Image (cartoon, rainbow, N blue to C red):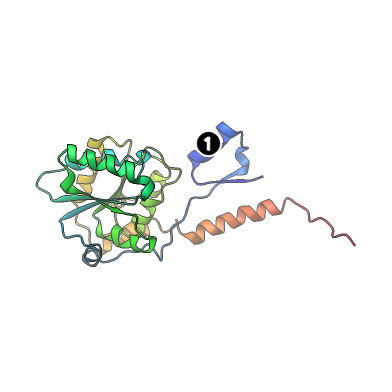
Amino acid sequence: CYIIAATPQEKRALVKHYGAIPENVFVIPCGVNMEMFRPVNKMIARQHIGFDGDKLVIFIGRIEPLKGIDQLIKAILLLPKDQDVRLLIVGGDEYSRPEIDRLKALARSLGNDNKVSFTGLIKQEQLLYYYSAADVCVSPSYYESFGLTPLESLACGTPVVATEVGAAKDIIRDEAAGYVVPDNAPRVLADKIASVLTRQTDAATVQQIRKSISGFNWENTARASLKVCRKAVSRYTALPIPG
């Protein structure tokens, strides 16, 4: 049989831990819907989500310890004091309540709770406004099998700071697109977030960021997957239909 893996790391894990035959494992990265995730004028996007501050850092995803959100909250405290920087944490449902409560308590203990807000679960078709409203999207995860959030953010023209997990190094290749950091230590995150926040991002830069991930579209992913499926089917001869 053939196996499709989202990243080279995932392929190596399948070979090492499950004895998969390397030649039978094909790496096909996940794709992003470039029509759904597209740039929106920042002022319009901020009006849409009700944000009226200066600099906006955003996290979008599941609310769980594996995502390293606590490290991001600590990093916000280390940013320059002369900037009005807010952190918006998008995601979470009723099952995330204990982790959300823990993160809110952490922000309060750091004196940071006025800078951190939680939106709860947002419909997918609304996410482009959140990505476009932000100055930088941060993915501080300890682990990702692939990591769609950075891909969606870049499709909206918003730079990303992400830990070196999943496909981060393959996705964030253009310096305008942001940075990949070795781990989610708060100082490491804060330094790169600060670097992005000092940039002036114009319409041309937004399009440059979006173009940098144009190869990660659904059409390419579907085409590559179909090729593997056809290869698998070609190995079998159709059985004759009993007369």
The quadrant of the image that shows the N terminus is: top right
* Image spot of residue 93 (x, y percent): 36, 51
Quarter occupied by residue 226: bottom right
Q: Which residue is mark 1?
A: 12
Residue at 60% from the left image edge and 38% from the top image edge: 22
Residue 170 left/right relative to 133: right
Amino acid at the residue labelled 1: Arg
The quadrant of the image that shows the C terminus is: bottom right
* Image spot of residue 160 (x, y percent): 30, 49
- Is residue 227 something one can see in this rendering? yes
Residue 104 left/right relative to 67: left
Quarter occupied by residue 78: top left
Residue at 29% from the left image edge and 59% from the top image edge: 130
- Is residue 180 something one can see in this rendering? no
* Image spot of residue 8 (x, y percent): 50, 41
Q: Residue furthest right?
A: 243
For the residue pair 154 and 108, the one nearer the viewer reads as: 108
Residue at 61% from the left image edge and 56% from the top image edge: 227
Residue 211 left/right relative to 48: right
- Secondary structure of residue under mark 1: helix
Residue at 14% from the left image edge and 40% from the top image edge: 111
